[in-house]
Amino acid sequence: MKGYDQEDTICALATPAGIGAIGVVRLSGKNAIGICDEVFPSKNLSVQNANTLHVGQLEEKGQIIDEVVVSIFKAPKSYTGEDVVEISCHGSPYVQGEVIRLLLTKGARMAKEGEFTFRAFINGKLDLSQAEAVADLIASDSKASRDLAISQLRGGYAHRLKDLRDQLIHFASMLELELDFAEEDVDFADRKELEKLIGTLHVAVDQMIESFEFGNAIKQGVPVAIIGEPNVGKSTLLNQILKEDRAIVSDIPGTTRDVIEDVVNIDGVIFRFIDTAGLRESADIIEEIGILKARQKAEMARIVLYVLDASNTNKVLFEKAVANVPSNETAKTFFVLNKIDHMDPHMLEKLKVDLVSKEHLVYVSAKNNQGVDHLLRLIQQHVQSGKSEGQSVTVTNARHLESLKNCKKALVQTSNGLADKRSSEFLAMDVKQALHYLGEITGEVTTDDLLGNIFSRFCIGK
């Protein structure tokens, strides 16, 4: 890939920039140990065993730069598959800069974005989907997103894709063989077995495509839109969920005119709660814009909390609210009957009887924090239920989703070709297309532009 010369020895700060207890400077390449030897007179690193630590001083012309710990990893048993040295120095930005400057004077060059992981990919230590999982793991901000990234990094996703590709490759080779013996009119590829395999692959690819909604929500944070008419307690509910006064609470209708958004971690899953303007007819242009935004947020959310005033709701008003939910086929709507503290127990029980419905009803008093924890448990359980039972692979990457959708089209073409009894030549083309799109995910099929786009999003030291 352009600018990523593998003959060079590269170095970079592998820990965040800034003041800290320590900083780690990483080198990778055939001269990594030799370069470090030139500035580390405390020991001859070239003769030391792999996977060892060495305490000593970095020096330049007899002047001590820092006291450090040097870790040695030798090819091929290292992250990049090359010789790797990691220098743990003190966390002063000045000291870190001096260490890197010293290594550059001895022949190393600064690593580019993601170049360490790129070398791991090129050297067969990771496939492309695992390399992308490294970036996801670094960016993970919850237990759920971390677990998904680790699962992908450990190769569960890659192994599933490899199984699919290996089976397709067998039939592709048989179809190619038929082309070599076209004049003999011989079938090497069993059409019934191929049809059965295509059906199995179709199901597997469909499951992975469907898993993206869950995986992407976990990775990006689950969007939860809080909507409803003015003065039903939307802002009070948001404040109670966030445990802080994030939204202004007022008896004046139309107080919330813009979208207010904040995040909460519930049992390892990040939720993005969005308070919106009250839904009503308004002559106020600013409020009307807020109402439009409210509907747009509800249409994009994965979960919608439609808040009603329980003390001012009956069956007719509830059915009107159900009909007024913004269109969003992928979202789960919870109807939250708020202000139950304003009702006597008899009236509350009567309301519950009147509103027997298939819709999900939750009764709360946001003001008194009554029923809010139950609501949050229901939300969390709903998200977890989004992962199909027995589904071992969860797709979180939009690039992978696009390749899977293209693979699905190729599988449909293959099925149609089998049904129409098309010749081996056309069947082989469709099977090759499916193989191509699966290979895009794991890196068997790549372009410099694709690799450049992926690795440019990594931090320098990774």
Image (cartoon, rainbow, N blue to C red):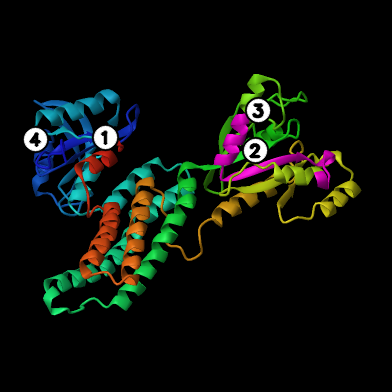
Q: CA distance from mark 4 to mark 2?
A: 62 Å
Under circle 1, the secondary element is loop
Query: On the rendered structure, is 161 left or right of 31?
Result: right
**181 falls in the magenta region:** no
* N-terminal label among 4 and 2: 4
Query: On the rendered structure, is 35 left or right of 114?
Result: left
Q: Classify residue 117 by image quadrant.
A: top left
Residue 153: image x %, image y %? Answer: 34, 53
**304 falls in the magenta region:** yes
Q: Which residue is mark 1?
A: 460
Label 2 crowd bin: few (<14), some (14–19), many (20+), radius 10 Å: many
* N-terminal label among 2 and 3: 2
User: Is residue 312 positioned above or below 428 on the image?
Assistant: above
Name the residue at 43% across, 48% down. 146
Q: CA distance from mark 3 to mark 4?
A: 60 Å
As drawn, the label of residue 147 is: none
Q: CA distance from mark 1 to mark 2?
A: 39 Å
Q: Classify residue 411 by image quadrant.
A: bottom left
Mark 4 residue type = Glu
Q: CA distance from mark 4 to mark 1?
A: 24 Å
Q: Which residue is mark 4?
A: 38
Name the residue at 49% across, 51% down. 214
| Front-lying residue, 297 or 373 | 297
* N-terminal label among 1 and 3: 3
As drawn, the label of residue 226 is: 2
* Contact? badges 1 and 2 (CB < 8 Å): no
Q: Which residues are magenta?
A: 292-316
Mark 2 residue type = Ile
